[in-house]
Amino acid sequence: MKIVIRIFFALLGLALGILLLPELFQLIEAATKMAFPDWLMTTYVTGTIGALIFLLIGLFITDSVIRLLRFLEEKLVKAPVADLFFGTFGLLIGLVMAFLVSMLIELVDIPLLSNVLTIFVTALFGYLGFTVGYRKRHELTKVFLRNNSNQAEKKAVAEPVVVTKSNSKVLDTSVIIDGRITDIAKTGFVEGKLIVPQFVIGELQYIADSSDTLKRNRGRRGLDVLKELQSIPGMEVEIYDGDFEDVSEVDIKLIKLAELIKGIVVTNDYNLNKVCEVRNVPVLNINDLANAVKQVVIPGEEMTVLVIKEGKEQKQGIAYLEDGTMVVVEEGKHLISKTIGVVVTSVLQTSAGRMIFAKPQEK
């Protein structure tokens, strides 16, 4: 890189020496009445002088130029494509304007000054064009989008547009650690492809390497669940290697991925569920599914339960159905460890699940 930059400075000095030094010498002769030898005005000598001067300048500023190039390279690589497009578009317009103005300057034909003004005008108009194009990118984008939407509306009148959505499911960390997704997948109720992002696997590995025993076990369980999912016949599990480096939170990355592939987020995280709803991203909550398939009971229905412990309120007993639903038995404290028949009095649905209130059957 250093060699290339120094060669560039030498060639630039060669060109400027050939073009500008003879005119500069003539101006000095006219101003000071001092005569320069003819050999000094030749192309070879002026070109050599210009090349040596700029080569010496290049030796001192090469490192600074390399740092500037690296800085610009990083900025351009990180910049969005739309910003680069509109900035380049503005730069081209500015260069065209500079070319037209330079033609007018050449008509005036002022020695030395014309060349300097041409360089200055080119740099000025190029900078202004890039700056205006970059800063007006949002307005230009709206103009293009408005034109495209108008064309799309015209096409929609002629022929219907069919909008298709992907049936892929994007799994988050919590639903993998939970493990119930494997039981659902084995039943065949899960349609489409299961997508596990690499950043979710990375989070599972981080949890599995934790010094806390509980977290370590949860992380290892999540990795085992992934392996089990991959072994289910007929179930397609894809590992998504992409990432969203501008976002640090895994939940936001999941939402962006679902928006990108037009997929569905599968979770049992209440907060992630709400964020998906706010951003109009389809979401499936395993807890909602579990509540939906629980046994349906109505007041007045009779059932048999085993009272296993005392309730919070006085004289209450607590029992559980096979699906884990809590049954609060009024006047059931003295019936602990007994299997009794009860009559449902009411059913309460809460965010934590469903609770059934009952009373012992009359003998």
Image: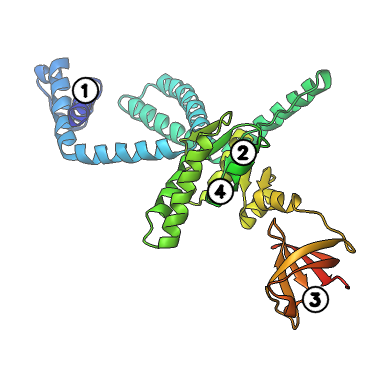
Quadrant location, the N terminus: top left
Q: Are marks 2 and 4 in contact (CB under 8 Å)?
A: no
Q: Amino acid at mark 3?
A: Glu
Tag 1 residue: 11
Specify the quadrant that holds the C terminus: bottom right
Q: Which mark is residue 185?
A: 2
Residue type at numbered disc 2 = Ala
Q: Position of residue 179 (x, y in %)?
A: 56, 48
Upstream in sequence: badge 4 or badge 3:
4
How far apart marks 1 and 3 lie (CA) works out to 97 Å
Tell me, for residue 179, which label it has, or none.
4
* Residue 291, percent from left and from top: 73, 54
Which of pointers 4 and 3 indicates the residue nearer the eye? 3
Q: Tag 4 or tag 2, which sits nearer the N-term?
A: 4
Q: 354 above or below 10?
A: below
Task: Determine the residue positioned at 20% across, 24% down.
Answer: 17
Q: In the rendered view, would you say 110 is above or below 314?
A: above
Q: Circle 3 sits on which residue?
A: 330
Give the image quarter of residue 155.
top right
